[in-house]
Amino acid sequence: MLRELADQYTHEDSDLAAYATHNSQSLGRRFPEKSHPFRTNFQRDRDRILHSRAFRRLEYKTQVFLNGTGDHLRTRLTHTIEVAAICRTIARALRLNEDLSETIALAHDLGHTPFGHAGERMMNRIMKEYGGFDHNLQALRVVDTLEIKYPSYDGLNLSWEVRSGLMKHRGPEKTFLDDVELPAQPSLESQTADLGDDLTYYGHDVDDGLHSGLITVEMLESIDIWNLAAEKARENNPAMYGERFRAFTVRCLIDMMVGDAIRHSHKLLKSLNINSQEDICKAGQKLISFSPEFEKMTLQLREFLYKNLYFHKELQEVNDAACDKIKTLFEKYVNAPDLMGHSAQSRLEKDGLQRAATDYIAGMTDRFAYQEYERLCK
């Protein structure tokens, strides 16, 4: 039997929890479109992201280790795919809208610069006097403005719920998107994407760090959550050692964090009687979260990664050299805008020289940034 759009809406009404985001409640798109006969708005948004140039470029952008330094090390693309998979698991268990959580997860890193967070920090310093730079807001800019897909307007024309999910920051002042005030707390699907991002990089950056040799199992034995995961791994096979032990312990680590997030979030939603976005805002706290016990352990792991991996001397030296290239390229483009691509040049009048140069550099892959540096600065 054919499942048409009306059938999908009926399925959502019967399967999703009252606190979930339903397609039928969507605030729509900036540019109205006809409904698709077989796909909901959030499913269409997911596919638009998957087919975008910005998504394809994630394959050659740094996660932790510069792209190309190891075939088994994660890129921004593989990280994104892993986040999306974990978000679907959490959303399904909590009866949230899986499509919306997955879509936000797939789009959450579209605004990242080349060379990872080091590149973002450099870009923010460069743009300090021109509004700064934040990869979350840049992701929104990518889907709203920088992707060119349609004959009459720029951007991917995504639904309001996906776009608002990319705006992670909620301050004391009111924030608006398309003249609609953002709620004090984002949707539960947005919160799922946010937590899914954190727990994914906790686990997988440990995996890559171990593979690189910059951190060791012996170093991790001071971390409570690693020891708990190692204990679970040993329960399956006490004789495991070496690569098999490391890989299976990482698996247990991720599974433990996902399970804790699901169980604790369900407990919160039930105890606070959450049934709507209004209830979510009234709660005054994140509702998709780790238990206090796991929150403490994950923060300990996060501090370990910052100290021993992200700012490791070997990585720092490579990142500093890469960031110097970003700064040099920015100065080149500002002094000679005709060196930028045609799309960037077309936005000079509307967006200003500095922002156009920033958009151009932020969209680069690691390897293209290196190529541009070699072409223009040698």
Image (cartoon, rainbow, N blue to C red):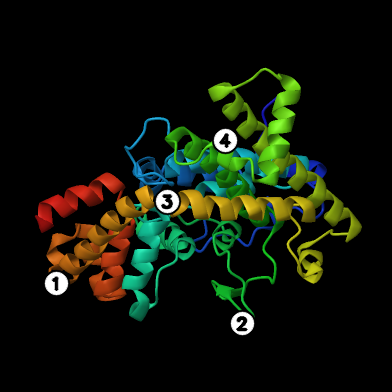
Q: Callout 3: 10 Å neighbours few (<14), some, many (20+)? A: some
Residue type for callout 2: Glu
Residue type for callout 4: Val
Q: Is residue 139 visible?
A: yes
- Tell me the distance, in whole angstroms, between the alpha carbons under discs 3 and 2: 37 Å
Please tell me whether mark 3 sits on a helix, a strand or a loop.
loop
Q: Earlier in the sequence, mark 3 or mark 1?
A: 3
Q: Earlier in the sequence, mark 4 or mark 1?
A: 4
Q: Callout 1: 10 Å neighbours few (<14), some, many (20+)? A: few
Q: Quadrant of residue 203?
A: top right
- Tell me the distance, in whole angstroms, between the alpha carbons under discs 4 and 1: 49 Å
Residue drawn at point x = 57 percent, y = 35 percent:
217
Q: Residue 300: image x %, image y %?
A: 64, 53
Please tell me whether mark 1 sits on a helix, a strand or a loop.
helix
Q: Does 89 appear above or below 161?
A: above
Residue type for callout 1: Asn
- Tell me the distance, in whole angstroms, between the alpha carbons under discs 3 and 1: 34 Å
Numbered tag placed on residue 312 in the rendering: 3
Numbered tag placed on residue 335 in the rendering: 1
Q: Residue 47: image x %, image y %?
A: 50, 42
Q: Quadrant of the C terminus?
A: bottom left
Q: Which residue is mark 2?
A: 173
Please tell me whether mark 4 sits on a helix, a strand or a loop.
helix
Numbered tag placed on residue 217 in the rendering: 4
Q: Badges 2 and 1: C-beta atoms under 8 Å apart?
A: no
